[in-house]
Image (tube, grey):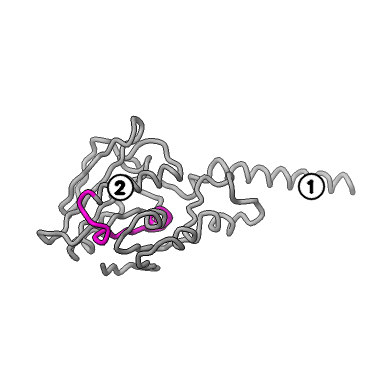
Amino acid sequence: MKKIIFRWTKLVILVYCSIGIAVYYLQDRFILHPVKLGTRQGYSFTQPFTELNLDYDPQTNLNIVEFKATDSVAKGVVLFFHDGHGNIGDYAAMSKSITDQGYELWMMDYPGFGKSTGPMDEQRLYDLALVFYKLARSRWKPLQIVLYGQGFGTGIAGQLAAIRDCRRLILERPYYSMTSVFRRYLFLYPVGGKFLHYHLPLHDYLEKVTAPVTVIQGDPVIRL
């Protein structure tokens, strides 16, 4: 009887450790599903747009698409941080609803998504988001800048809104934090600390945001 219990105990421990190791090394594949594009591949959007490529460092190119407002003089700009799958092309359909309201819509792809390249980690995402914001500030005042995060991107938009002024923060399908998301499914594991590659504690950032915050669930109807 003792031998049977011992064998089952070893088996349970082995399975537990195997799952934990797999989650640690494969967690990016669970939450991120990038689709890469060739650097020379062209976009074919129906809305007028401009494409920019910023060399952040020798390894990192930040690909940005700017959709132009239908008005001759734009009221401001919406900086969009997309969810963790696809690339800019998967989100371009929303551009008309923004540009028809007199705002430009700027989208950036994270490293490894679309035409953006380079290493990616949580701090790198914050750094690139700040570069994105500073680019907008070269043309717009803070009260003309709207930050918009969707899914995975809500944590990035929230962190940026916590350290920089903006007119408004829009969060579509936000989460409390990546830690809370993983704990929901991996409650038997010590999720947190260095176990997770991305924490994105949106709840902490929102405490520091002074701009109005709009939360969207379901099909978004965006009023700027």
For residue 101, side relative to residue 185 (left or right): left
Q: Residue at x 39, y 50 (%)?
A: 85
Q: How many angstroms separate mark 2 from mark 1 (CA)?
A: 52 Å
Q: Nearer the viewer, residue 149 or 45?
A: 149
For residue 224, side relative to residue 177 (left or right): left
Q: Nearer the viewer, residue 170 or 109?
A: 170
Question: Can you identify the residue that label 2 sits on?
Answer: 132
Question: Can you identify the residue that label 1 sits on?
Answer: 9
Locate the C terminus by quadrant.
bottom left
Q: Give the magenta part as a residue range.
A: 138-157
Q: Earlier in the sequence, mark 2 or mark 1?
A: 1
Q: Residue furthest right?
A: 1
Neighbour class for label 2 at 10 Å: few (<14), some, many (≥20)?
some
Residue 213: percent from the left, percent from the top?
Answer: 37, 67
Residue 50: percent from the left, percent from the top?
Answer: 18, 47
Q: Quadrant of residue 75?
A: bottom left
Q: What amino acid is at disc 2?
A: Phe
